[in-house]
């Protein structure tokens, strides 16, 4: 079973909601993220080995939301230190380019890297 992470993930507890992209109902929060995976914090355990169609709703300019739909496979799930919460690790199977842009933007924001100079 896969247990070692090759890419550093950045912690994002209770920052971005994750939704089921079929029903558009919330299923948890993004705990951390990388180009190839993510951790979901949820009040219900996730089924290990199952594929999930997930949706991220990212705040955009002028009160609009950018929607990123992706498919991810649950690799592991265990109870969180917070009672009645579960952490689940996902491998991203299919994601649009906007997901990679989100990962880059979050990495830059949480790493306190300077913004690129505008041309």
Image (spheres, rainbow, N blue to C red):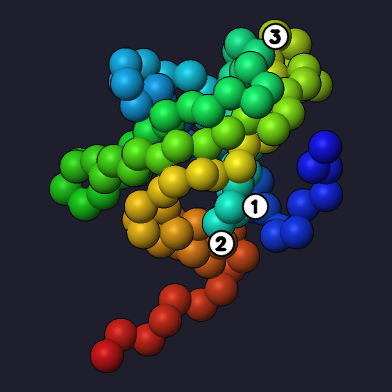
Relative depth, front residue between 35 and 15: 35
Q: Residue 117, position in %: x, y?
A: 37, 86
Residue sitting at x 44%, y 46%: 94
The residue tagged 2 is 107
Residue sitting at x 19%, y 42%: 64
Residue sitting at x 63%, y 17%: 47
Does 35 sit left or right of 66 as displayed? right
The residue tagged 1 is 10
Residue 94's disc is none
> Is the residue under label 2 in contact with that under label 1 (CB below 8 Å)?
yes
Label 1 vs label 3: CA separation? 23 Å
Label 2: few (<14), some or many (≥20) within 10 Å? Answer: some
Q: Residue 72, position in %: x, y?
A: 52, 36
Q: Does 53 sit above or below residue 10? A: above
Label 1 vs label 2: CA separation? 7 Å
Which quadrant is the C terminus positioned in? Answer: bottom left
Relative depth, front residue between 98 and 58: 98
């Amino acid at each position: 079973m896969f247990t070692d992470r090759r890419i550093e993930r950045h912690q994002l507890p209770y920052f971005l909601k994750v939704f089921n992209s079929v029903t558009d109902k919330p299923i948890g929060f993004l705990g951390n993220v990388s180009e190839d995976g993510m951790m979901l914090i949820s009040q219900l355990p996730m089924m290990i080995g199952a594929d999930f169609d997930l949706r991220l709703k990212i705040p955009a300019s002028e009160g609009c939301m950018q929607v990123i739909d992706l498919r991810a496979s649950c690799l592991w799930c265990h109870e969180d230190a917070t009672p009645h919460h579960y952490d689940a690790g996902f491998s991203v199977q299919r994601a649009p380019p906007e997901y990679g842009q989100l990962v880059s933007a979050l990495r830059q924001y949480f790493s306190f890297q300077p913004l690129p100079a505008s041309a």
